[in-house]
Amino acid sequence: MTAVPRPPRLSPDGLAAALSGLPLWSGDGEGIRRSVQLPGFPDAVAALVRIAFVAEELDHHPDVDLRWRTLHLTLVTHSAGGVTELDVELARRVDRLLPG
């Protein structure tokens, strides 16, 4: 199986530009983060399942912490040592699934 090429780590300016278009996210070169509170635990699990399908499409998976009805997401391309365009694209798709 051939490895999927990964984009390079974003520059500080590139990251700042990306975050300006993602107002629900914050972070730095080590990772971007968003927390989402849902009405209840089943809703949070259902949201996580929807995110899982999108992540699988991109072959790029978030770090997730599920606490009762709150999802804490961290996006980072570990192989690049920081945030890449893959993280930004996954954040955009998460925002389409779970608008603010």
Image: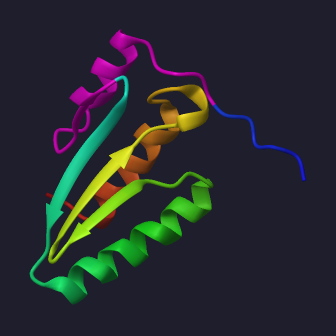
- Nearer-the-camera pick, 75 or 99: 75
Could you say which is closer to the camera, residue 47 or residue 23?
Answer: 47
Q: Position of residue 18 (x, y in %)?
A: 33, 27
Which of 32/18 is in front?
32
Q: Is residue 21 above or below residue 89?
A: above
**Residue 3 figure quarter:** top right
Q: The C terminus appears in which quarter of the rendering?
A: bottom left
Residue 77 lies in the magenta stretch: no
Report the label total: 0
Q: Quadrant of residue 29?
A: top left
Q: Is residue 4 left or right of residue 79?
A: right
Q: Is residue 19 magenta?
A: yes
Indicate whether 91 appears above or below 6.
below
Residue 96 percent coordinates (x, y): 31, 59
Q: Residue furthest right?
A: 1
Q: Residue at x 74, y 35 (%)?
A: 5
Q: Please provide percent x and percent y for residue 26.
A: 20, 35
* Residue at point 47%, 69% (across, down): 52
Q: Residue at x 24, y 77 (%)?
A: 44
Model colouring: rainbow
User: Measured from the top left, where is residue 99 in percent x and y?
Assistant: 20, 60
Vertical relation: 67 (above or below) 29: below
From which residue to which does the magenta span run?
A: 7-28
Q: Residue at x 30, y 54 (%)?
A: 73
Question: Is 61 situated above or below 76?
Answer: below
